[in-house]
Amino acid sequence: MSGLDLGQFKSEIVVPVLASIGLGGAAAVNLLTGTALAESGLYALRQRNGPALGLWQMEPFTHDDIWATFLSAPRQSGLKTMMLAMLARDASGGSDQLIANLRYACAMARLKYYRAPEQLPAADDARAQARVWKQIYNTSLGAGTPDPQHVALFQQAIEA
């Protein structure tokens, strides 16, 4: 299998997207880069035999829930405006943007973590990042585990 260059993905997509929505920093960048590695290997745009979409493999329900219960809140109007501006005009609306629009998909994945009450793990702690990924992003319903294989993916993200 092949995928995107991890260093370029991190520096050209994740870093600028998170900075543009004001939710960056090394911990967030490494967590989001590791999440994409753990979820799709940076190559799958659709989950096989499942509903998840994009490099971060977000499910349409999760996407729609972020819009309905988080971005619709008046205190999030600034984030909502930034997310609306990020939509690709030549792509379908809604969760289809998760496939066609890397910037949008990255920002939506960051919002999934941002709305959780847990603090981000340290930028250089791959084991803690894998645990937070499983707890918040993959959840107890997901197939992923914070095992050594996944910890290694977060370590790759840290080193990229």
Image: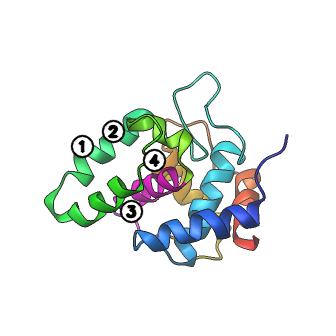
Query: Residue at (66%, 70%) from the top-left corner?
Result: 11
x and y percent of residue 112 in the render?
41, 53
User: How has the structure been colored for display?
Assistant: rainbow
Return the mark for residue 59: none
Q: Main secondary structure of the magenta part?
A: helix
Q: What residue is disc 2 on?
A: 64
Q: What residue is disc 3 on?
A: 114
**Three-letter code for the amino acid on which mark 4 is drawn:** Ala
> Between residues 62 and 90, which one lies in front from this camera angle?
90
- Does label 2 or label 4 sit earlier along the sequence? 2
- Does label 1 or label 4 sit earlier along the sequence? 1
How many numbered circles are shown?
Answer: 4
Give the Cα distance between marks 3 and 4.
23 Å
Give the Cα distance between marks 1 and 3.
15 Å
Query: Residue at (38%, 34%) from the top-left corner?
Result: 61
Quadrant including the C terminus: bottom right
**Three-letter code for the amino acid on which mark 2 is drawn:** Asp
Q: What residue is disc 4 on?
A: 88
Instruction: Tell me whether the residue at label 1 lies in contact with that at label 2, contact meaning CB atoms closer than 8 angstroms.
Output: yes
**Local SS, label 3:** helix
- Kindly report which numbered mark, 1 or 4, lies closer to the viewer in this rendering: 4
Residue stretch rendered in magenta on the structure:
103-120
Q: Residue furthest left?
A: 74
Give the Cα distance between marks 1 and 4.
20 Å
Quarter location, residue 33:
bottom right
Q: Residue furthest right?
A: 1
**Local SS, label 4:** loop
Is 113 colored magenta in this rendering?
yes
**Local SS, label 2:** helix
Q: What residue is disc 1 on?
A: 68
**Three-letter code for the amino acid on which mark 3 is drawn:** Tyr
